[in-house]
Amino acid sequence: MTSRLLTTSLALALVAGTALSPALAADPIKIGVPVGLSGANSVVAPSVVQSAELAVEEINAKGGVLGRKLALEVADDASGAAGAQKAFDALIFQKKVNVLISMETSAARNAGLPIVARGKTPFIYTSFYEGKSCSPYLYVNAWVPDQQVPPIVDYFNKEKKAKGYFLIGSDYAFGRGMLAFTKAYIEKTGGKVVGEEYLPMDGSDWTSIISKLKASGADALITSTAGGAPNVTLTKQLRAAGVNLPYGNLAVDEGTAKGMGADAAGIFLSASYVTGIDTPANKTFLASMAKKFGAELKTPNDLSVPQYEAVYAYKAAVEKAGSTDQDKVLKALAEVSVDGPRGSIKMDKQRHAPLTMYLGQVQADGSVKVIQSFANVDPGAQCPGKS
C-alpha cells in the first residue's frame, strides 16, 4: 500500500510540475580531474586524486554546494598532449563536467586549453609550472618561477658561494621555461651558467649529461624535470655517479622525495607546501587525510594540496555566483579566497595567486627541513593587461 501511495503521489506531482525542481537541483555538480595516472606524472597523481576525494567528501558531508552534491570524474591524460586531448574532450563534451581542476604536465595543459575554450569551461590548474599561461577560462593556485626560483639561487649564492651553475631539464615547456627563468636570474645576481642540458620527457638515461656536469667545474646544480619519474631516475643516477654538488630541484615534491629514499637526502627545494607547516589548518588536513586513507595514504605535497584547496575555491565561487553558470563562476574565482593547509589563497593576481614559499632541504627520512620562509610572494606579471 505504501509503495502504491508513493507512486501515485509522484505521478500527481509530475503532472502538477512541482516535484522535479528538487530532483533536478539534486543532480551532482561534476568536477573533472584530468591527471597523469600513467606516464611521467604517475608517481604523484595518486596523491592528487586523494586530495580531491577528501575535499569532495568533506563538502558533501556538510550539505554540498547550493544544495547539490559534488562528484568527481577522473580521466587519465597519460601525462602528455595526446592523452590530454582525449581526456579533456571526454570530460567536457561527454561527461559534461562543470569545471576542470587538475595537476598536469605543461604539455597536457597546453593541449587541453583549446578544448577548454571551446567548451567555455572553468579550469583551475593546480600544478606549479613555468608561468605565463593565460586564458579567460584558466586560474592557477600554484607557484610560478618568479615565486619559486629566487629562494634557491639566492641561498646558493650566499651560503654556498656558488658562481658557476649547471642546469638539467626535461625537454618540454616546463623544463625549458623554468630553466630559462633560472638562467636569467642567475646572471642577474652575478652568477654564470656553465652548462645546460636536456633529455626528452620520457628519457631515463642521464649518463652523458652527468658526464658533462662532472667535467664542467660547476659549483651548483639546478634541475627542472617532469614531475615524478624523471626526478627519480636523474637523482638516482646523480648519486650513483658521486655527484655531491649543492643540488636544487625545481620539480620535486615532498611525496616523490620521500619515495626516493636515501637518494633524495640533501636536495634543496622551494615549495608553497610542506607537511611540516605548523598551523591548525594543516594539522587538521593531515589528520583528515590519514583518517580517510590510512595505510594507502600518499604523502601530501606541493602538487596535491593545491588540488584540495582548488575544490574549495570552486565551491566558494559557485556560492558567490549563486549558480554554476560559467561566466559568473569565472568572475567569482578571482574574488574568493580559501583558507587551507597553505594559508589564505586568492587567485586575484592576473588569475594567479600570491603564495608563502618555503626553502627546504630533504632529510635522510624523506621529510623536508624548512630553512627559510617568504610570506605572500607575488607571482609577478603572468598575464599583462589581464585582471
Image (cartoon, helix red, strand yellow):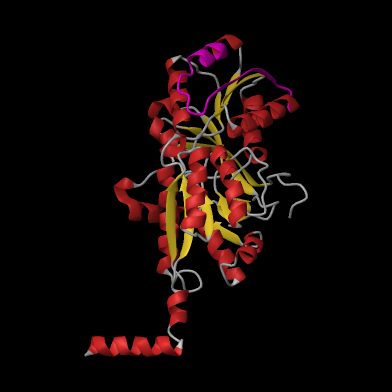
Q: Is residue 254 above or below residue 74?
A: above
- Residue 11 covered by magenta stretch: no
Compare residues 254 and 65 and report the one nearer the observer: 65
Q: Is residue 337 above or below residue 89?
A: below
Q: Is residue 194 magenta?
A: yes
The image quadrant that residue 246 belongs to is top right
Quadrant assignment for the N terminus: bottom left
In which image quadrant can residue 176 be found? top right
Q: Residue at x 53, y 25 (%)?
A: 200
Give whichever of 307, 6 is nearer the camera: 6
Viewer-proximal residue, 95 or 308? 95
Which residue is painted at 46% across and 86% down in the image? 17
Please provide the residue range marked out in magenta: 189-213
Rendering quarter of residue 186: top right
- Name the residue: 70% across, 52% down: 349
Image spot of residue 324 (x, y percent): 56, 67
Does residue 84 appear anywhere in the picture? yes
Q: Position of residue 87 (x, y in %)?
A: 48, 47
Q: State which quarter of the image contains the C terminus.
A: bottom right
**Location of residue 232 in the rendering, given as x and y in whole percent from the top left corner:** 44, 28
Q: Residue furthest front?
A: 15
Q: Pick out the residue farthest to the left.
A: 1
Q: Nearer the viewer, residue 228 or 299?
A: 228
The outermost residue toward the right is 385
Q: Is residue 21 left or right of residue 154?
A: left
Image position, residue 377 (x, y; %): 66, 45
The answer to whether 364 appears left or right of 177 in the picture is left
Looking at this view, name the residue that lies furthest to the top.
Answer: 215
- Specify whether residue 278 is in view: no
**Does 230 sit above or below residue 290?**
above
Relative to 191, is 124 on the left or the right? left
Vertical arrangement, residue 221 with respect to residue 306, above or below? above
